[in-house]
């Protein structure tokens, strides 16, 4: 079950720059809706992109067997923020 939830993050751990895609999408949604929740989600994704880049290109190179337990904490936060932001965007659009 956890593997299914964390499988999208395999893309981000392999290609950290890909985490900027959701950040940019939420920045564009923020410009359309002007909601703080959407902006916070965009900022969270951008911070995660920087953090993941650091973990991939600096930290994992210095460790013999990197075990990424931090993803278990980060993924639910990003999932919740993403769901809340999308709900905020689409709630009044219909």
Image (cartoon, rainbow, N blue to C red):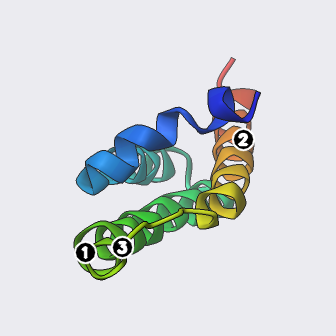
Mark 2, other Cα within 10 Å: few <14 / some 14–19 / many ≥20: some
Q: Position of residue 3 (x, y in %)?
A: 64, 32
**Helix, strand or loop under label 3:** loop
CA gap between label 2 and label 3 equals: 43 Å
Q: Which residue is mark 1?
A: 61
| Contact between labelled residues 3 and 2, with CB atoms less than 8 Å apart | no
Position of 46 relative to 86 (above/below)? below
Q: Position of residue 79 (x, y in %)?
A: 67, 45
CA gap between label 2 and label 1 equals: 39 Å
Numbered label attached to residue 64: 3
Is residue 92 shown to the viewer in this render? no
Numbered label attached to residue 88: 2
Task: Please name the residue shown 69% across and 17% down the image.
Answer: 94
Residue situated in front as seen by the camera: 13 or 92: 13
Q: Position of residue 64 (x, y in %)?
A: 36, 73
**Helix, strand or loop under label 1:** helix
Q: Position of residue 75 (x, y in %)?
A: 64, 52
Q: Please state the total of marks drawn on the protein image.
A: 3
């Amino acid at each position: 079950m956890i593997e299914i939830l964390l499988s999208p993050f395999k893309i981000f751990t392999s290609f950290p720059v890909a985490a900027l895609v959701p950040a940019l999408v939420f920045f564009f949604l923020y410009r359309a809706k002007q909601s703080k929740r959407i902006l916070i989600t965009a900022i969270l994704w951008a911070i995660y992109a920087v953090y993941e880049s650091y973990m991939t290109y600096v930290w994992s190179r210095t460790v013999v067997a990197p075990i990424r337990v931090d993803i278990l904490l980060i993924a639910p936060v990003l999932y919740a923020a993403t769901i809340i932001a999308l709900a905020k965007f689409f709630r009044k659009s219909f």
